[in-house]
Image: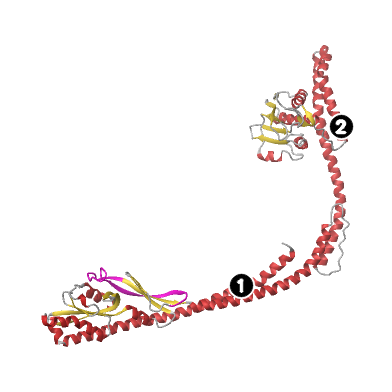
Amino acid sequence: MTFRSRILVSALAIAVIPLVAFGLGVRRAVADRVTAEYRERVAALVAQIRRDLDAESAAIGMRLAALAAAAREDNRFRLAAQGVAAERPWLLDYAGQAMSLAGLAMLQFQDDSGRIVSSGHFRNEFDRLEPGLPRALAAAPGGLAIVPARSAAGPFLAFARVDSLRIGRRAITIVGGTAVGPLLARLARDGALTVSLEHPGGAVPAGDTAQGTVEIVGALEMPYIDDGGGGTGDGGRVMPARLVVRHSLASLAALRRAVDAWFAIAVMASAAVTLLLAGWLSTRLSRPLAALARKTAEIDVDRLDVTFESERDDEIGALARLLGGMTERLRAGAARLREVERRAALGDLARQVNHDIKNALAPIRNVVRHLADVARARPGELAAVFGERQGTVDSSIAYLESLASNYARLSPRLERRPCDVNAVVRDTLRNLAAGKVEVTARLAESVPAACTDPLVLRRVVENLVGNAIDALDGKPGAVTVSTERTDGDDAPGVRLTVADTGRGMSKTELDRAFDDFYTTKPGGTGLGLTIVRRLVLDSNGRLRVETAPGAGSGFIVELPGDPGGAA
């Protein structure tokens, strides 16, 4: 992301985030306030509905009391209730006429055995036993309960109460009430308010359901009398039901949409103005900074003549002058660095020459010691022994001459040609004296020629075998040098392995094994493995190590084969 883009994004965030937070806070505060007002209003409506139900219950009770008084004064009703057969048809129709006059939706008369002697809402209910209904109504809180009933048009629910009268020795029970559906519609005075009934048998919605999002805001518990079988009358169990009051939140949703619309307009306008101002400001800042960046990009170790001049008196001018001073210091530092690098390179070269010469002098030293021992013990055999060891001396001297030629060029060029790996290994091992260490060569006969410099390969073998002998720390042990054939991309290659039975290396030691000047041997230079890795890589080969503490180490060199040679 560019500096200009960062300015634009930062300015946009600074302008929009507080506005968004403010808008969301206002929206939430408005919604909470309006919702609280709705709840207060609905709480008042719920209380009013409770009072309306109490008034409805009292009205039903008054009507039933009036019907009881009228029945006691009606001679024909009294005769029919006492069993006069001639008045029985008149009794069957009595409840229907009384229900119409009283404005009830349900009315029935029962004798003292619980038998229905007259039913106004369903004439065919006479002679049906329903003794549990009056008892349940009498036990209901407040005397008002929801009762399932049926008429010729179908089943319905009613808010019912119970009353009674005595005619002679007989007790007559009156059960009456109003239909639930119309009453629910009357209870919902507010157009945004709905009142529904939830009971064990299902639910009765209000007659006029409010539109829009609704929220349950209140409920009135009511007793529900189960008829035990769809109006068969063998029930009488009281179960819970409730009147659920809901209020529409459509107006609140409309208010929120209006607030959201104005909020979106404010955010977009603020974002547009912010982007314009930030774009102008970022242009004023980014152009001089881009010019400084172009000049800075021209700075290089070999080109430190770039100048930074500025007449500005602000931070950008100060930055330009700071860059100019830094460039001056870089010029002086680069000169000092070149001198330090030259001296470091000479030091590294001296260490490497010392390391290679020590490796080349070791066979000569061994031959000289051998000749000295023979001269003291068997002087007569000195000439013969010198003849046997003359090849080692000549080989070591030739090796030193090759090193001298290579170091004379400072950067020796490898002569990649077919090289007999087994022959180089045998010649190198013949010139090394292992002392107590047993150096074993396991050379495969089918090894193809490797494409490398024989001198490089000899240096690799000498360093690896020397490190393996040193890893034994003067203790008896074994060093094994083996070769085997590998499959290459262009031609078969050679795998050279130098393994020892020494102490091995820890993970920390292995991680630093190829670092320059890192050594664990007293008097060591720490360049052996570094030289080996560089020589292997220069030969397009690979080097890896298999080691573990106490299990010895194995250095594996994989060299490419000669593409033009025979397998």
Quarter occupied by the N terminus: bottom right
Nearest to N terminus: mark 1 or mark 2: 1
Contact (Cβ within 8 Å) of mark 1 with mark 2 = no
The residue to which callout 2 is attached is 404
Q: Which residue is depicted at the point 30% across and 75% down?
A: 156
Residue 152 within the segment the image draws in magenta: no
The residue to which callout 1 is attached is 20
Quick one: 283 or 490, which is closer to the camera?
490
Whole-percent x, y for residue 469 in the image: 72, 28
Q: CA distance from mark 1 to mark 2?
A: 79 Å
Quadrant housing residue 290 = bottom right
Whole-percent x, y for residue 377 in the image: 79, 14
Whole-percent x, y for residue 191 in the image: 43, 82
Q: Secondary structure at mark 1?
A: helix
Q: Which residue is depicted at the point 73% across and 23% down?
A: 435
Stretch of the chain drawn in magenta: 210-239
Q: Secondary structure at mark 2?
A: helix
Q: Amino acid at mark 1?
A: Val
Quarter occupied by the C terminus: top right
Is 141 positioned to the left or the right of 430 in the image? left
Q: Amino acid at mark 2?
A: Ala
Residue occupying the far front of the picture = 153
Is residue 440 in view?
no
Q: Which mark is residue 563?
A: none
Quadrant housing residue 493 = top right
- 238 in relation to 101, above or below: above
Q: How is the image coloured?
A: secondary structure
Residue 219 within the segment the image draws in magenta: yes
- 28 in relation to 300, above or below: below
- 531 in relation to 440, above or below: below
- 262 in relation to 475, above or below: below
Q: Residues within 10 Å of mark 1 (few under 14, many from 20)?
A: some
